[in-house]
Amino acid sequence: MSAVIIRPEEPEDPEAIRTLLATAFGGEAEARLVDALRAAGDVVLSLVAERAGEIRGHILFSRLIVRNGEEAFPAVALAPLAVHPDHQGEGIGTALMDDAHLRLQRDGERLSVVLGDPAYYGRFGYTHQRAVGFESAYQGDALQALAWGEAPHAGRLDYAAAFADLG
C-alpha cells in the first residue's frame, strides 16, 4: 500500500473534496458547509490525504471566536473531518489530525473546538471537560476542546456564519 500524502488543499481539489464529503457523510450538508466557509474566507486550514493520486480524506478548521465580555480570542473549529468509507481504519484520519495539529500550533493557534464523538476525538487530546465552560448552542458531551498553551476556559463560542445554515 502506498504512503498517504498529507498536503494543503489546492485550487483543483474542491470537487474531489465535495464528492468525498457527500460519500463519507451520506449527504450534501458538510460539502455545503465547506463551500460556504471557503466563500466567506473563514477557512484557517484545509488539508487533504492523498494516496495513489486520489483524495481519500479531508480535514478543515475554520475561524472561531471566543467572546468573554469585551475580549475576543481567536480559536479554530474542526469541522469536518472525513475519510472515504472504503479507506477508514487505515490511519488516514489520524494522519490528518496529527499533521493539522502540528501546522496549527506552528501558526500560533492555541485553542481548537470540535463537536463529535468523544471516544474518537479524545484520542487526540480533546475533552468535554476543557469545553464545559463555553456558552454554545452545541454545549453537551460532544462539544470538546484542546488547548496548546494559554487559552480561555469560558466565554461564548462564535462560529463562522456558515454553521448557522447547517440546521
Image: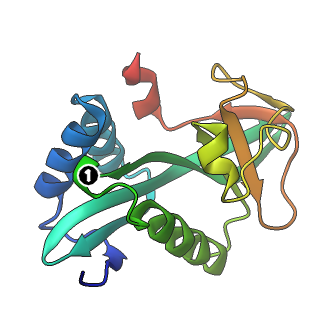
Left or right of residue 135: residue 14: left
Residue 10 position, x and y percent, is 22, 71
Q: To which residue does mark 1 refer?
A: 84
Image height of 147 relative to 10, above or below? above
Residue 109 in which image quadrant: bottom right
> Looking at the picture, does residue 46 appear above or below residue 131?
below
Q: Nearer the viewer, residue 53 or 15?
A: 53
Q: Going by the image, does 56 lie left or right of 106?
A: left
In x, y percent, where is residue 64?
60, 45
Please tell me in which quadrant of the rendered image residue 36 appears.
top left
The answer to whether 140 appears left or right of 98 in the picture is: right
Q: Secondary structure at mark 1?
A: loop
Q: Residue at x 66, y 74 (%)?
A: 105
Please state the horizontal and vertical placement of residue 149, each as a whole percent of the image: 84, 67
* Residue 77 percent location from the top left of the image: 57, 47
Viewer-nearest residue: 32 or 26: 26
